[in-house]
Amino acid sequence: MTFSMDSQTRRQLIQVIESAPPRPHHHALLEAANNVMTHGEFRHVLSKGGWYRVGGVLSPDGNRLGLALEDWVGSELKKCGNDFEKFLAAYTDKELLVTRHAGRIHYFVAPYGPAPEEFLQLEVEELQELWDRKLINPEQPPQDRTTLVEPIDALKVDAHPVGSPRYRFARLLDARELLVRGEETPLGRFLTEWSQSRAAENDHFCEHWLLANLERYDPDAATRFDATLMSVHARTLTPFQWDSTKAGVALGNQLREFDRAAGYPAAWYFHLVANKFVPGNLALELQRDRKNGYAYLAGKDLQLLENLASAPYRLNQAGNI
């Protein structure tokens, strides 16, 4: 199955996303976004937070002077003839404020076909602008433009909110354009094995794995994407304690416990190959149990293990496509 979205629909999608008010379960965003979709339906699968970016400039009474700190500084320096000392003399006593945007990113997926690569991944930032610091610390004034914009000893202020939180469209990825099944690459093999495993019998691939893309530019200025995978269940699986002393039935039970925590069968295998949350020697331990007569692996799981033994591979941290 193929998916296409014309530029008008894409613009409409961005508009409704950024017009929706942030809510705990993103109901307004999902309803608006899914009304735009011609087929497929977005659902929320993951949120990550704890980051921020530099905001703008405010007067002490909260009036907006500039939306972006760098742009405002550049403009005001130009008015001062690019004389930094003159700039400091003009603004040191004005107690201007610099804001920051505290952010979270929400991941939404919309499968449009049964194949593991047939899904859209929508990424939306939720931003709240906050007071961050004084523009100039009079006790330790900046020496140049760089230390003004990125001070070593910033004079912090209480983080009062500036306006209401808002959504910002980040990007929309069609996984089919980035992922290709087959044996040519580790990630391609990963997708092929998923489609042949017990995991594919219950849920779509994007219910459990997301794309984490790093965009970079080749020397000829053509855009290239290096894709890695991100587990939707990282928060749940990080504290999972593997007991390397277990073998036989106890090890089989541990596999089932991990699968339950991940939410799908054969999760142990795919996290093993992805180098995430599973000990690297697990495959050897399972092969040893099999030689000792234990038969706790399902048929499809056993086939995955045998394929890995005959042709070992792991997903790298980058460069998988």
Image: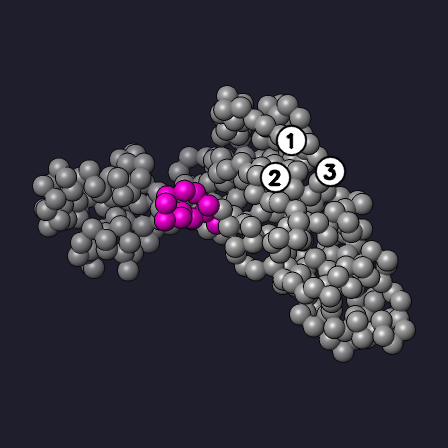
- Crowding at label 1, few (<14), some or many (≥20) Cα neighbours within 10 Å? few
Q: Residue at x 74, y 47 (%)?
A: 195
**Can residue 87 be spotted in the picture?**
yes
Q: Position of residue 315 (x, y in %)?
A: 61, 59
Q: Residue at x 31, y 39 (%)?
A: 68
Span shown in magenta: 214-224
- Residue type at mark 3? Pro
Instruction: Say what amino acid the circle numbered 1 marks.
Output: Thr
CA distance for labels 3 and 1? 11 Å
Tag 1–tag 2 contact (CB < 8 Å): yes
Q: Looking at the image, is mark 1 or mark 2 earlier in the sequence? A: 1
Vertical side of 232 occupied by 61: above or below: above
- Label 3 vs label 1, nearer the camera: 1
In the picture of the structure, the residue carrying the numbered disc 2 is 176
Identify the disc placed on residue 2.
1
Examine the rendered structure and indicate whether residue 17 appears above or below residue 126.
above
Is 221 included in the stretch rendered in magenta? yes
Residue 294 in percent (x, y) is at 89, 71
Mark 2: amino acid:
Arg
Report how far apart the C-alphas of labels 3 and 2 lie in the structure. 12 Å
Q: Nearer the viewer, residue 38 or 321?
A: 321
Name the residue at 64% across, 23% down: 38
157 vs 294: above or below: above
What residue is disc 3 on?
A: 114
Front in this rendered view, residue 191 or 64: 191
**Residue 287 is drawn in which quadrant?**
bottom right
Task: Measuring from the top left, give residue 177's x and y in whole percent.
Answer: 57, 39
Q: Is residue 319 left or right of residue 40?
A: left
